[in-house]
């Protein structure tokens, strides 16, 4: 099975790939700081890249090339499409496997067969390829067999630094589908309390106000996805913090509260703010994101999602300890939840961002 779409607007109104060569590029990672390059200088312009989901350490944590089984951004599908654009590829097919993706094929199919959303980008071709797609593992195995290749053998080779891109000789891709673009507006909601002594420095508190909207009705005929936990709870927490900060003496630094739009559609509101900040990111000294707050009652435990990804983690841990709280490990670090919420577009640009959940 295969699903494919495009988030790259074009004037032609369709995507057409004819006899596009297919090349297996392992995990599709270029990470010079880890001495890792799956591309080895191959000219990939106009080609469709076939890539594994996650990174090499998921299959063999003992490699410790990417820090063990906890996913890095290199393992996230968003990175892989971005890297494909940097390589000049015509498209990418990610081989879906449930365990390294941390979700099933139904999630892929449901997410990629309807309308796709994106922000208006200054140069979308720098971050988007004409075709973004997924294939099931069984489809990949059959495709590799058609090219005279062993999928599992190449997958094992892809775990090493000496892996080289492998053309799927005798296999190519024809793809054609219509593409229509509609521009809509949605809004981030922002409030600011100016700091008393360092007003030009900003501390962010964030949540997202959107959920999934209206879908298929349940047995009672209710078709509304209310999002009471994800993320009305975080939005309520943000409003309460605004009330408390507003009634208290001014903090030294300025406090900025942002309720983002479009989180469920791909972190759109936070991505837009990161690209078009109201207050300079260079002087945004810290941020704290709330995505699904505790609705179960009092707890002393705090789970820091993606522990070690943020410079703030140790500070949060120290503050928690001072309050008699305990820090609990990320329950599923291989799933890459740190890269799935609104703090990440800001963290990606160097803003220290913390993402904690109830324990």
Image (cartoon, rainbow, N blue to C red):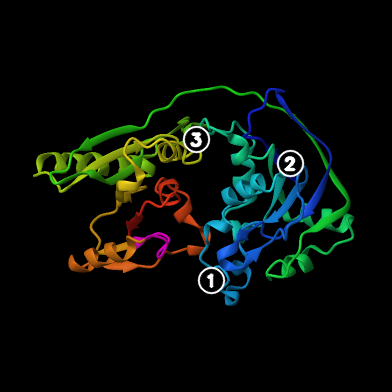
- Check whether the beta carbons of the residues at disc 1 and disc 3 lie within 8 A of each other: no
Horizontal and vertical percent for residue 13? 70, 23
Residue wearing tag 3: 218
Residue wearing tag 1: 68
Instruction: Look at 58% across and 73% down and name the residue there.
Output: 61
Instruction: Look at 45% across and 55% down and name the residue there.
Output: 338
Magenta-colored stretch includes residue 328: no
- Check whether the beta carbons of the residues at disc 2 and disc 1 lie within 8 A of each other: no
Q: Main secondary structure of the magenta part?
A: loop
Horizontal and vertical percent for residue 198? 18, 46
Please name which of the two marks, 1 or 3, marks the residue nearer to the observer.
Answer: 1
Q: Can see residue 359?
A: no
Horizontal and vertical percent for residue 293? 31, 49
Task: Name which of mark 2 and mark 3 comes first in the sequence.
Answer: 2
Rendering quarter of residue 199: top left
Instruction: Look at 66% across and 59% down and name the residue there.
Output: 27
Task: Name which of mark 1 and mark 3 comes first in the sequence.
Answer: 1
Secondary structure beneath label 3: loop
197 relative to 58, above or below:
above
Q: CA distance from mark 1 to mark 3?
A: 41 Å
Residue wearing tag 2: 90
């Amino acid at each position: 099975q295969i699903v494919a779409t495009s988030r790259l607007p074009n004037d032609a109104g369709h995507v057409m790939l004819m006899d596009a060569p297919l090349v297996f590029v392992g995990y599709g990672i270029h990470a010079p700081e880890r001495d890792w390059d799956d591309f080895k200088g191959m000219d990939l312009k106009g080609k469709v890249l076939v890539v594994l989901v996650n990174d090499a350490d998921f299959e063999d944590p003992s490699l410790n090339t990417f820090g063990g089984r906890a996913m890095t951004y290199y393992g996230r599908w968003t990175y892989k499409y971005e890297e494909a654009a940097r390589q000049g590829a015509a498209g990418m097919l990610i081989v879906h496997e449930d365990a390294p993706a941390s979700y099933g094929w139904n999630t892929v199919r449901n997410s990629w067969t309807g309308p796709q959303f994106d922000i208006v980008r200054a140069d979308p071709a720098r971050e988007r390829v004409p075709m973004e797609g997924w294939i099931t593992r069984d489809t990949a195995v059959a495709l590799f067999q058609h090219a005279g290749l062993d999928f599992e053998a190449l997958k094992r080779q892809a775990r090493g630094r000496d892996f080289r891109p492998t053309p799927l000789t005798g296999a190519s891709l024809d793809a054609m589908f219509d593409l229509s673009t509609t521009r809509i507006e949605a809004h981030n909601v922002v409030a600011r309390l100016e700091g008393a002594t360092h007003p030009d420095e900003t501390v962010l508190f964030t949540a997202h106000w959107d959920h999934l909207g209206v879908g298929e009705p349940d047995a009672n005929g209710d078709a509304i996805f209310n999002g009471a936990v994800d993320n009305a709870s975080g939005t309520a927490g943000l409003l309460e913090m605004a009330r408390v900060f507003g009634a208290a003496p001014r903090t030294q630094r300025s406090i900025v509260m942002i309720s983002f739009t479009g989180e469920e559609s791909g972190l759109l509101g936070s991505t837009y703010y990161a690209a078009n900040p109201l207050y300079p990111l260079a002087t945004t000294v810290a941020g704290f994101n709330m995505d699904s707050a505790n609705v179960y009652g009092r707890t002393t435990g705090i789970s820091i999602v993606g522990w070690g990804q943020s410079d703030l983690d140790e500070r949060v841990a120290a503050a928690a300890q001072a309050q008699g709280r305990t820090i609990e490990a990320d329950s599923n670090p291989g799933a890459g939840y740190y890269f799935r919420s609104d703090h990440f577009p800001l963290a990606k640009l160097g803003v220290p961002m913390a993402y904690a959940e109830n324990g």
